[in-house]
Image (cartoon, rainbow, N blue to C red):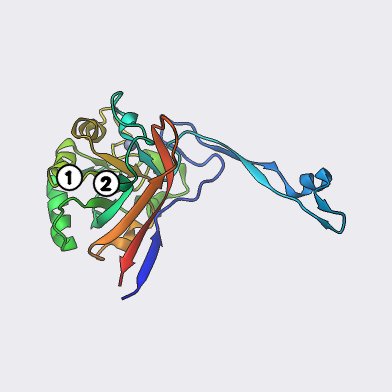
Amino acid sequence: MSQRIIDLSLPMTDNMPAHKLFQSPVILPALSHEQTKDFGLGIPEDRMTFATNYLGMLDHVGTHVDALYHTNPDGASVDEMPLEMFFGKAVCFDLTHIPDLGEIDVDDLKAAEEKSGIRVDGHIVLFNTGLHERHYPNPEVVRSNPGLTAEATHWLADRGSRAHGVEGPSTDLPSNDLFPSHRVCRDRGIFHWEWLVNLEELVGKGEFTFYGVPLLIQGGSGSPVRAFAVLEE
Ligand SMILES: [Zn+2]
């Protein structure tokens, strides 16, 4: 048996698209190798130069996790959530029949669960909708994602699934401000990763291990993550 790693993260780039309520990140060179030549580091025959970048961003940029505090004033911030919440057994549902701005409801989850061959029992559940493939890097991507219904979000919580993950910048439709899935997450104490990519590589693979570990940001409402899956093959 060998392990295969699938990277599920979107590259972080300057001014990349963001959710309609969020600012895009600023990612710029701070000091270049060229500039730091003048610092006189190292020895004359072997100058030591370095490069750094400036990152100015929300804690919800690109591939990220929402902390419980994001939607619940009394919820745990990202640094207060135990590390073990951010990885675990997982399954990826094929929901490529859901169109842009479509709704993912309980019947879709039941059918996808059946197709996956894995009964959800405390799994992290990822939803492959094909959104990223269809749109990225067109900014339309942030105005097109499907949404999970409140009932579908309850379905996950009822099966002990404490966390799920989606393509695109939100688990809720960008076309209204009702946030049914975020409200259920808030009320049931569950959370999610947003803007995962390459999920199509996990469809039909059964159970695997997902990792989406945040930075330890004090009081963080979320954090960018390097998300990946480990498949045993
Ligand atoms: Zn969210």
Q: Which mark is residue 156?
A: 1
State whether label 1 is within 8 Å of ligand 1.
no
Q: Residue at x 26, y 31 (%)?
A: 179
Please tell me whether mark 1 sits on a helix, a strand or a loop.
Answer: helix
Disc nearer the start of the sequence (2/1): 1
- What is the x, y in percent for residue 64? 40, 43
- Would you say residue 128 is visible in this rendering? no
Q: Judge from the rendering whether residue 72 lies leftward or rightward of residue 220; answer left or right.
A: left
Q: Amino acid at mark 2?
A: His
- What is the x, y in percent for residue 111? 13, 55
Q: Which mark is residue 164?
A: 2
- What is the x, y in percent for residue 144? 35, 42
Number of numbered discs on residues? 2
Name the quadrant where ligand 1 sits.
top left
Q: Amino acid at mark 1?
A: Leu
Mark 2 and 1 residues: CB-CB less than 8 Å, in contact? yes
